[in-house]
Image (spheres, grey):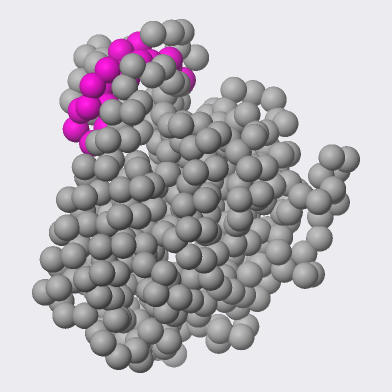
Amino acid sequence: MIKIAFHTLGCKVNQYESEALMEAFAKRGAEIVPETEIADVYLVNTCSVTSIADRKSRQFIRRMKKKNPHALMVVTGCYAQVSSEELEAMPDVDLIMGNNLKSEIPDRVCELLQARENRETAVPQKRKEVLAYRDLRGYEDMGIVTASESEMSRAYIKIQEGCNRFCSYCLIPYARGVVRSRPLEEVLEEAKMLLNKGFRELVLTGINTALYGTEPEFDFQREPGEEGLNGLEAVIRRLDAMEGDFRIRLSSLEPTVVDIKHIERIVQYDKLCHHLHLSLQSGSDAILESMNRHYNREDYFKIVRSLRDFDPCFGITTDIIVGFPGETEADFEDTLDAVRKSNFGKVHAFRYSARKGTKAAGFKDMISGRVKSRRAGALEEQADEISKEFFRRNLNREDRVLVERHENGMATGYTGNYIKVYIPDEEETLDAGGFVSVRLIELYEDGCLAEITGKRR
């Protein structure tokens, strides 16, 4: 029995695809071991959203190979897709597999291990299979994923691949290819299996989730009542109608795709969490235009107001890039102002990183590292205060928490609007995977302390 260890960087889609690969290897009799252990195969599922992500990918490759220099080192993901020549130059890498070929990794690994065992001299020292961008078409079937090694209560369902927005700073469309959607019946089948295994939260994820079903060739049989609904709304409607006590969460939505009418329709579903990750990227109209984001700050604020009209405590989290080429102090102040006005529950701040092959990489007026660091620090300080303000708005409010794990005498989990909650539970009487009704009583750590008010289920 071979032992294989995984390390996954980047987005929820990468996490999902690593879970799919773990199941595929386990079905072949392999033992999945922690990355800290000695293994026969190490697989690094890489990210390339920033230059820092590239560097981390290389660091983990070297770190894992040192544990067993004789192990087979497999690298896949977005860095493998867009920078395969850099990986070829690394002596530690044995197999490079690009995106849309991940389902073939178990076969390739078995072939290489068998060739090594047979001491075949014709076996190449490195093997690379990476499709050209124009060939990243068709949704890759990686099977039904029915487990989650990283979560005891929450499961991810990948419904969509690719992006056609081409923001000027973003490499991901080139790494992931055109938009293609997973058949609706497969999404529903996976959801049923996960619910039957006891998962209580289903997170719909994709490279640009809101684009699900938008490609002209995609078709699904609409049921009565679904006339006029787009693909994502149809998925949510079908899941919402399933029996059982569970909730649905969207991993993220892009304001480049959705509008107020779209938002107002989907938030009406009972099982959908009152939380959206809605990427802002900048609060400056000039920078948003330069980023090719196709909305302005007022468009964004209209969505925020609509969500808060529906529920004053609706949770909104976001991504923001600081130091984009040409960003002035006035532009940055607009971003800080947007953070204050939106009352985000959490802000993920990123320093702009030029990605070779993107339009923005050729822009003039690059911002110095010193200025980017200063602005990032100011944004993070502002965001921390705004998050606390959002938490305070939720104090004395009752909500349901899905317990996920225990930490230092506390049961922890998240509310539907994505506030991390700490519940005193020294005896660990609250089981992971169950809902419990609580009241948020005070700010604590990176969320709120809560007391139990209702029955555990």
Q: Dividing the picture into quarters, in which one does residue 193 lie?
A: top right
The residue located at (22%, 45%) in the rendering is: 384
Q: Is residue 320 among the parts visible in the rendering?
A: yes
User: Which residue is at 42% across, 85% downward?
Assistant: 358
Q: Is residue 442 magenta?
A: yes
- x 19%, y 32%: residue: 445
Q: Is residue 173 magenta?
A: no
Using the rendered view, name the quadrant where residue 359 is placed: bottom left
Question: Residue lying farthest right?
Answer: 224
Identify the magenta region.
435-452
Answer left or right for 340 relative to 63: right
In percent of width and height, residue 220 lies at: 81, 55
**Drawn side of residue 296 relative to residue 161, left or right:** left
Whether 65 is drawn above or below 222: the answer is below
Question: Residue 275: x percent and y percent?
Answer: 47, 39
* Number of marks in the rendered image: 0
Give the percent coordinates (x, y) of residue 263. Answer: 61, 47
Q: Which of the two residues, 380 or 150, is positioned nearer the viewer here?
A: 380
Relative depth, front residue between 112 and 237: 237
Q: Main secondary structure of the magenta part?
A: strand
Q: In this view of the protein, can residue 64 be seen by the observer?
A: no
Q: Is residue 15 left or right of residue 257?
A: left
